[in-house]
Amino acid sequence: MRQALIVILALALPSPVLGQEAAEAVAVAEPVTETVQVADSERPPTYAVPSRPYPAPAPISVAQDAASSLARAELASPIPDPLAGRRYPVRGVSRPLTLSEGQARLDQGIGFRGGRGLYVFAPQQFTVGITNDFEMALVWPISRDPSLQATGRVFSSPELDVGVRGTLTVPAITTGNTVARIGVPIVIRAANFVRIVTGIELDLLFTAQVSPMIAIPVQLQIQGSNRLFYGLQGSVALINGNTWTSEVGTFLAHTNSAYAGGPIMETRIAVNWLIEERTPMLITTFSFFPRLW
């Protein structure tokens, strides 16, 4: 600040004294430049950065672009369900008349019949769904003759299934007679929790004289929970056109285990009363549902 003031006074008042002081001030204000010699050993090292030429990207062909778009579409699209349309319902009242394609079912029962004496029997049946509308079964009660059964579904809707069933029993073990059975099974889904299984069956017993029997079975199923269903069952039969026989009963079924494809194991307990014979009958059935394909 003092040096600037002296310069201003020197310009305004030209006096020898002020001119000398201003000159000194100007001389002081001028920067002094000095050259310093630095040895080569004290200089910092320098490094040359080599140039790295990068090749230009290769052009993408139309085929490569289409393949890339297809790959992205496949990754974005959902994985197809291998059991689409072939899953067997876990809920009893939602099941169709026939098994779904590739689904099998093994039923093993243990029965007790009273009356004049305790009678133990063990019915068993193995069924395979050939298609969603056709199944075949082998019925082989222990100590009794085997039967071959085929069931086809000829009409299907969300509320009603109608089919045709044929059963042939041959005397392979006992000295009994050949029995042919033709039936029209019907499944009615009256509500989301109600299922009715009925139909009409004609049995032909081939002996010296053919003995026909007409039977009408009825079963009412009610879904109590996702894996529990129960209901009432019974049947009425006319033998040789002059003898009636009938039975009534109840049952309780529970799906013990299941997976995304359907049930795995099921237990059913049924109690029937043979009206004309006044005889009780208890049957416990264990069902397994393996998937073959």
Image (spheres, grey):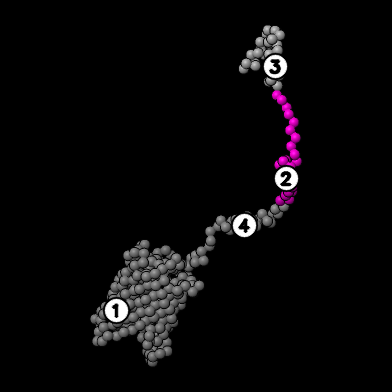
Q: Name the residue tied to disc 2.
A: 47
Q: Between residues 95 and 170, which one lies in front from this camera angle?
A: 95
- Indicate the secondary structure of the residue bearing disc 4: helix
Q: In the rendered structure, find residue 24 and report the number of the disc placed on it.
A: 3
Q: Is residue 27 left or right of residue 98?
A: right
The magenta-colored residue range is 31-57
Q: Amino acid at mark 3?
A: Glu
10 Å neighbourhood of mark 2: few (<14), some, or many (≥20)? few
Q: Amino acid at mark 1?
A: Leu
Image point (26%, 83%), residue name? 114
- Indicate the secondary structure of the residue bearing disc 1: strand
- The Cα–Cα distance between marks 4 and 3, rounded to whole angstroms, is 86 Å
Q: Is residue 39 left or right of residue 129?
A: right
Q: Name the residue tied to disc 4.
A: 70
Q: Please tell me in which quadrant of the rendered image residue 73 appears.
A: bottom right
- Which comes before the other along the chain, label 4 or label 3? 3
- Indicate the secondary structure of the residue bearing disc 3: helix
**Callout 1 touching callout 3 (CB < 8 Å):** no
10 Å neighbourhood of mark 1: few (<14), some, or many (≥20)? some
